[in-house]
Amino acid sequence: MQRADDDAAIGRMLAGRRIAVVGLSDDPARPSFGVSAHMQRAGYTILPVNPNGRMVLGQPCHPTLAAAAAAVGPIDVVNVFRRPLACAQVVRDAIAVGAKGVWLQSGIVNDEAERLAAEAGIDFVQDRCIMVEQMRRG
């Protein structure tokens, strides 16, 4: 179910240009790769966050959000391709690095993550695809 403020949060997050993608795979068959490749082609800077990777989409992988922020500076949006149980910690990490928003991809819902984001005053969207929303809004 879409919250009333989702539309405004989506607009603010899509206005950001630097997206850290937690769980970005280097496997072109994985949704995280396809979504991130689309966002990169649309002009967004993609920061892969995956402790198992080396390079994805021509960008070096960072083992953590903290490492990504230390290497490249401020992060606008944290896009999450992880299991729901991992999402609350991802939100804590996003808050710690000063990210402006957290986006849980389609099929990913976590009430604790939503609560943490609300308490920190950062944008939060869950169970929606950032690529679909970007395409819809042009």
Image (spheres, rainbow, N blue to C red):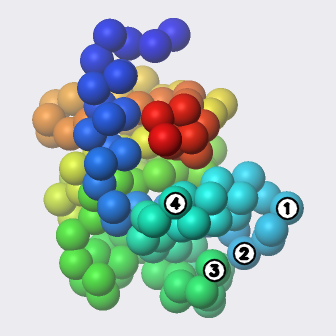
Question: How far apart are the alpha carbons under marks 4 and 3?
Answer: 16 Å
* Residue 120 lies in quadrant: top left
Residue name at image x 38 percent, y 13 percent: 3
Question: How far apart are the alpha carbons under marks 1 and 3?
Answer: 13 Å
Above or below for 1 versus 96: above
Q: Secondary structure at mark 1?
A: loop
Q: Which residue is mark 3?
A: 56
User: What type is the residue that disc 2 sits on?
Assistant: Asp
Q: Position of residue 66 (x, y in %)?
A: 30, 73
Q: Which residue is mark 2?
A: 26
- Label ID, residue 29: 1
Residue name at image x 49 percent, y 41 percent: 138
Tell me which numbered mark, 1 or 3, is placed earlier along the sequence: 1
Q: Secondary structure at mark 4?
A: loop
Tell me which numbered mark, 3 or 2, is placed earlier along the sequence: 2
- Count of picture labels: 4
Tell me which numbered mark, 4 or 2, is placed earlier along the sequence: 2
The answer to whether any part of residue 116 appears in the image is no
Question: How far apart are the alpha carbons under marks 1 and 2?
Answer: 9 Å
